Amino acid sequence: MRNIGENTITAAVLESIASCDDPRWKEVMSALVRHLHDFAREVKLTQLETYAFGENAHLSPTS
């Protein structure tokens, strides 16, 4: 298991997106991840707030 923390999570997620077959989806999701992670750090998003977002966000290339 990788040691993922506040300073390594963005790179880990971007690494997982890198294998996406759709170049546009990869571009959009990479930008979204970078911006969301910067936002979360800026406002010091709590773990509970992060989970609440995750429960309500349904992101896929077909939705």
Image (cartoon, helix red, strand yellow):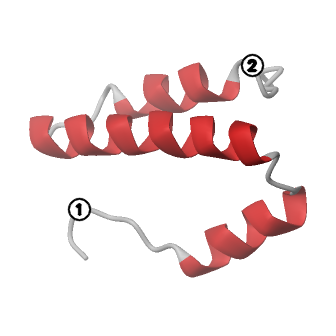
With respect to residue 19, does 59 lie above or below?
Answer: below
Where does residue 24 sit, x and y in percent of width and height? 12, 41
Give the quarter of the figure containing the N terminus: top right
Residue 44 in which image quadrant:
top right
Residue 12 in which image quadrant:
top right
Q: Residue at x 71, y 39 (%)?
A: 42
Q: Secondary structure at mark 1?
A: loop
Q: Residue at x 54, y 46 (%)?
A: 36
Disc 1: which residue: 61
61 on left or right of 47: left
Q: Secondary structure at mark 2?
A: loop
Query: Of label 2 and label 1, which has the lower sequence position?
Result: 2
Q: Amino acid at mark 1?
A: Pro
Q: Residue at x 16, y 37 (%)?
A: 21
39 on left or right of 62: right
Please name which of the two marks, 2 or 1, marks the residue nearer to the observer: 2
Which disc, if any, is residue 7?
A: 2
Give the quarter of the figure containing the C terminus: bottom left
Where does residue 52 sit, x and y in percent of width and height? 74, 75
How far, Cα to Cα, is label 2 from label 1?
27 Å
Q: Residue at x 45, y 74 (%)?
A: 58
17 on left or right of 44: left
Q: Amino acid at mark 2?
A: Asn
